[in-house]
Image (cartoon, helix red, strand yellow):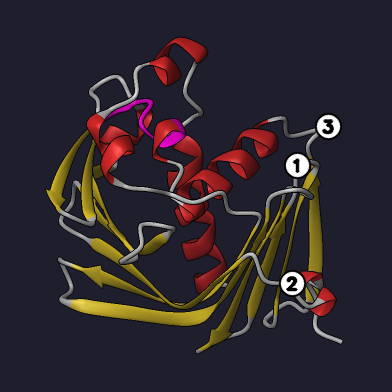
Amino acid sequence: MRFRKLTAVFCWFLLASTAATGAEKENVSPIDKRVDAKNIDTLQAEFTQTKQIALLRHSIVIAGELYMERKSGRLAWHVASPIRYSCLITDQSLTQWDIDSNQQVTLSVDRYPWLKVLSQNLKDWFSGNIQNMSSGFTTELAEKREMLMIPRPDNRIAEFIKSIKFHFTDDGSSVSRVIFTETNGDTTDILFKNIRINQPIPPEKWNVKPN
């Protein structure tokens, strides 16, 4: 249950950065020109997420796989260790399963309209679509392939998040690492490896509950 809550909180962080308006998208920042994000149709990667709790000097590490398919609007987040948990997000619903309860729960976009925003923002964040992500943040280049995003005061996420730092792959095609620094000093560091872009995704990866 703890890991399901961690993933839910992480998704809320992503949701809090709503998509940019048309006017904001017209103002292309220098970062968009420096990071040459490719046209990503599918993305697959392994991830390790480390949550460092400042007050307790304690860390929680989870690992798994991420799958994204732009055309269908699907994104799957499978945690493999130390406990099994899966979450499938589409333009129409969010479905999750965990080994503790062995229950599959689905939330519909008809009842929870924010799911559509969540789906789009997740695809933007993981594919490195900076132009859409920049709404609600000030951005600056830290290094050639690093970008620091700081929530604007009127952004809801500023109450919880101090900054978000993105590391991009050498060819600038996708995000390789994301570091969240919270206002209470906690950090969440998500490292992606074995990133595959525009390769077919096995159908079974869209199953929320293991067979």
Label 2 crowding class (10 Å Cα cut-off): few <14, some 14-19, many 20+?
few
The residue identified by callout 3 is 110
Q: Give percent across and percent down for residue 22.
A: 51, 14
Q: Which residue is located at x 23 percent, y 68 percent?
A: 53
Q: Give percent across and percent down for residue 56.
A: 18, 73
Q: Which numbered circle lies on residue 150? A: none
What amino acid does circle 1 point to?
Asp
Query: Label 2, label 3: how many angstroms apart (C-alpha)?
Result: 30 Å
Horizontal side of 96 relative to 56 (left or right) equals right
Query: Label 3, label 1: how many angstroms apart (C-alpha)?
Result: 11 Å
Q: Which residue is located at x 57 percent, y 48 percent?
A: 123
- Secondary structure at badge 3 equals loop
Give the quadrant of residue 181.
bottom left
The residue identified by callout 1 is 91
Does residue 192 belong to the magenta stretch? no
Part of the protein shown in magenta: 132-138
Horizontal side of 168 relative to 138 (left or right) equals right
Q: Which numbered circle lies on residue 200? A: 2
Q: Are marks 2 and 1 in contact (CB under 8 Å)?
A: no
Give the mark, 2 or 3, whose residue is nearer the N terminus.
3
Comparing marks 3 and 1, which lies closer to the viewer?
A: 1
In the picture, which quadrant includes the N terminus?
A: bottom right
- Secondary structure at badge 2 equals loop
